[in-house]
Image (cartoon, rainbow, N blue to C red):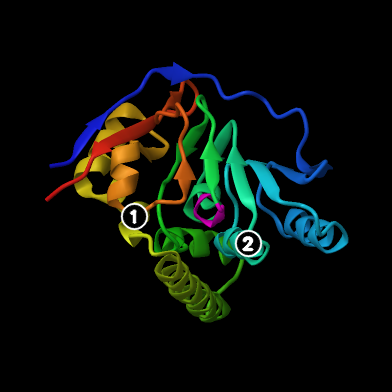
Amino acid sequence: MLRVFFSLFLIIPWLSFAGVSLSEQRIIYQGEISAKNNQHVAQLLTEQPNINSIQITSGGGNVDLGMDLAELILAHNLKVHIKQFCFSSCANYVLLAGNPTTIAKNAIVGWHGDAASARWRDSDIDAMVSHLKEPEKTTKWQALRTHYDEIIAKAVAREKAFYAKRGVNHDLLTIGLSKELKRAAVAQKARGWSYSKKALNTLNVNNIEFADWQPRSAKNFPLLIISELGD
């Protein structure tokens, strides 16, 4: 059985700072997961070997950059702290890398798909070549389709290897993409989904210290809440 409900709405706090900084032995990572921010993290870890944790507030970013950050965290055996907001690549990868990951009581954590679901649509490529004329237009379109499909295929393989390494059920990223939940998401204008503690345990997410956390939505960022998983 799969049970879904909506939680009370909360307001996501505005970030007062976006980027990477250091507070004693903790890295503070706020905003998009980017190459620049990841490079700053790597630099700090090299220069400050006593760093033991990273606190992240992020709506996600590029799939590969999310996995890059997660691998940095794993390589340095860092704790991960989520105090406000962690969505998309932040939840897909960074959340799973902490040893452990702690989630604060009022934090919002959510998912909206896997690497495969990030595939470029044909309409996206149509827009990229709209200024060209035939036969160049068709040739360029086919080249771009092949190029982007190769990027996604590599990301999918890397993602599956990461999940196997962490021992986590990859369904974590795809359950909310079912027809039933897609319909519910459209009806409720949800941006994605979150899971109860019980559901996360069922999916073998076992590196989290929850404290008093329960899955939540925000008024301006509604999420489906998946409370229970089963056959």
Q: Which residues are magenta?
A: 95-99
Q: Quadrant of residue 34?
A: bottom right
Q: Residues within 10 Å of mark 1 (few under 14, many from 20)?
A: some
Q: Amino acid at mark 2?
A: Leu
- The mark nearer the N terminus, 2 or 1, is 2
Which of the pair 29/79 is nearer the observer? 79
| Element type at mark 2 | helix
Q: What numbered label is drawn on residue 65?
A: 2
Please identify, in this view, whether the residue under mark 2 or under mark 1 is nearer the observer: 1
Number of numbered discs visible in the structure rendering: 2
Q: Amino acid at mark 1?
A: Asn
Is 46 positioned to the left or the right of 160 in the image? right
The percent coordinates of residue 17 (x first, y second) are 78, 33
What residue appears at the point 40 percent right and 52 percent down from the top-left corner? 113
Q: Nearer the viewer, residue 161 or 103?
A: 103
On residue 204, the disc is: 1
Image coords of residue 4 (percent x, y): 24, 33
